[in-house]
Amino acid sequence: MSDFKEQPPNAPPSPYPSVVGAETAPKEAYDATMSPRLVHWYTICASSLIVFASVLNTTIPPSPMLTYTITAGSLSFGIALLAILFHIVPVCKFWAIGTERAPVKEFVALTFLTVWWIVAIALITQSGGIATNSLNLYYSSWLAGIITVIALNNWFITHGSLSARDFVNTSPTLVAWYFMLLASAVVMGSAANLYSTTQPQGGDKSDFIYAISIGTIGCFLSLLVILANFQVNAIANFLIPGGFIELFLSFSLLGLYIAGVIILTRANGIASSAGNLYYSSWVCFFNTFWIIAKWRRKAETTPQSVTDNHNLEGDNLEDL
């Protein structure tokens, strides 16, 4: 009787035809030191260390917020350092990662840090917060949060699950509308927080009202366009992605934010110093130009037309 084992009809061609019964090539061992997220972990580790060191060097008197900021930086630094060791130390790598390109342990760590830094950024960088007079603390907090989100998105891409790219491929302008939604929310929230802490009177009060108003309008209009891109019937019936209504909304927001950056960021204005309100106002302003530049008259919403006519590389989403 022959020792030859008949291959299944759908089996891939053997790379070793001379070996009896060979069906697939041996899999190459995964090297965790080549993980695309390792550079993200290095950045999270460094930025968290800067947060921790900046707080230790501050002259702010002891307070619960000071203690929280030290905890935020040190805990994030510890988790990032462990993740780096898990990627480069053989014994740790075998236990934590093994042969997985997107290990569940890494997903849990990134999810926790994402939530952790969203809360930390809101508290640390708020108007009148501990980062008001410490730019190192301000920028490193935002850097840690942004890189954590990018690393989490990269994990989803590697795992083959839903990622940011799956939510922005229906329209060339959709990415910009997401940014508009987030930046407008920061404008609205920062202005409301600053108003509650300063209790302004006279002309400054009207500036705060205007900032809160344009932030709210920006959030509302952005949400309308985003929902229209996902074919929510009540909205998509009158707001077609790429249509003239979208262009009209873009120019409306441009007018609001032109006035916004003139009024809010002028000398001695409520957003004249570096902070969340200042940066988010300018982001919204420039973002309207991005939307207008990406606008197209005829919406093409079928999956095939999107695949054939829209290239996401122009939005730099591959870098996420």
Image: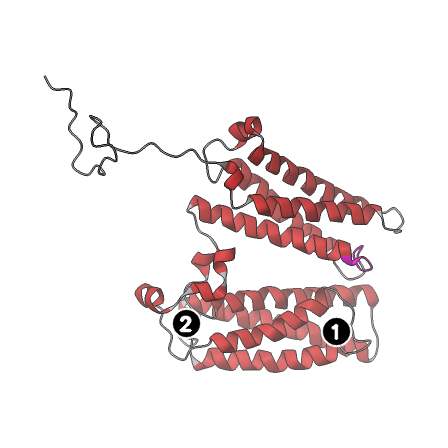
Q: Is residue 230 visible?
A: no
In the rendered image, the quadrant that contains the N terminus is top left
Q: Residue at x 44, y 70 (%)?
A: 172
> As displayed, is residue 143 above or below residue 95?
below
- What colour scheme governs how the chains and residues are painted in the rendered image of this protein? secondary structure
- Residue 206 at x, y percent in the picture: 76, 78
Q: Is residue 32 visible?
A: yes
Can you identify the residue that label 1 sits on? 208
Q: Residue at x 46, y 80 (%)?
A: 245
> As displayed, is residue 288 above or below residue 48?
below
Q: Residue at x 83, y 72 (%)?
A: 200
Q: Residue at x 39, y 74 (%)?
A: 237
Q: Earlier in the sequence, mark 1 or mark 2?
A: 1
| Magenta stretch holds residue 127 | no
- Residue 103 at x, y percent in the picture: 49, 37
- Residue 315 at x, y percent in the picture: 49, 65
Can you identify the residue that label 2 sits on? 236
Q: Mostly what secondary structure, the magenta segment?
A: loop
Q: Amino acid at mark 2?
A: Ala
The answer to which quarter of the image holds residue 129 is bottom right
Q: Give the residues drawn in magenta, as a range.
A: 129-135
